[in-house]
Amino acid sequence: MKKYLTSILVAILLVSILTACVGEEVPTEDPDAFMTSVVGTMVSSFFSTQTAMYTPPAPTATAAIATIAPLPTATVVYPTATFALILTPTFIFYSATPATITPTGTLATMTVDASSLAVGCDNLAFIRDVNIPSGTVIEREQDFTKTWKVQNTGTCDWMYQYSLVPSGGDDLGGGATKIQKTVTVWDWSELSVSLQAPKKPGTYTSYWRLSNGQTAFGATLAISIVVSDGSAASTPVP
């Protein structure tokens, strides 16, 4: 502050010297105007000096914005399972003990008769034995029923009055037997006849055919049995 006052006094002194040195009469100046000028000069000098002396504050460091690093990407690795299909073979064994039959004589074999051709529109084909296959042992004088499965291979239906009739072989006590039903063309059916085993032991074979009332037609159906003397048990009928 003293420095500022000193500057003001120096300025006033310079003004006084300049006034004295001038020989000419200086016009008298209004004191108020003179003081206003002096004060303005002082204020201007003060602010210029103050501005020169002002030291601006050091810039404040701006805090750096923290950068958040991206989260690491997790890689999930699933274990690979290996499956092995192990097949253990299973063996199934079947064992069957066939019945031992020792018949006497010669057993009949089911064959197609050469004369089994159609008669008119009627014909018959043998399919299989339903029961009492060839070689079945039956006790003496035992009643039984023989059944065959056949097919109508003609062009006409078998009618109610068609009958199974004996066509040769041994007499097993059976006679002509009506089928008592209608069998359409190409249908399968079962035909049966009631028989009786002879008194004497041995092997017996009987042959049968289907008749339309006038002529027998189709395949020959056979039944072959073994009559037991009582020492052997009968063979079960399948």
Image (cartoon, rainbow, N blue to C red):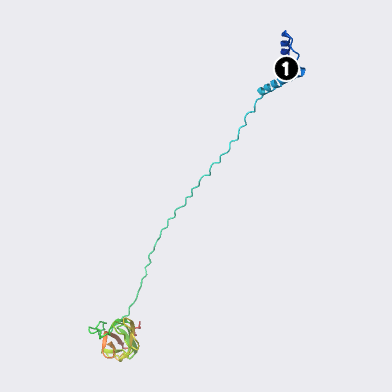
- Asked if residue 165 lies left or right of residue 49, the reply is left
Q: Which residue lies furthest to the right in this view?
A: 31
- Asked if residue 139 lies left or right of residue 58, the reply is left
How dense is the environment of label 1, judged by Cα within 10 Å: few (below 14), some, or many (20 and up)? some
Kind of residue indicated by mark 1 = Ile
18 to 212, vertically: above or below: above
Pick the residue in front: 222 or 106. 222
Q: Quadrant of the C terminus?
A: bottom left
- Asked if residue 83 lies left or right of residue 190, the reply is right
Residue at the spot 77% in from the left edge and 17% down from the top edge: 31
Choose top left, top right, bottom left or bottom right for residue 39: top right
> Which percent across, then down, holds residue 97?
34, 77
Q: Quadrant of the N terminus?
A: top right
Pick the residue in front: 199 or 8. 8
Pick the residue in front: 196 or 154. 154
Residue 169 visible in the snapshot: no
Residue at numbered disc 1: 8
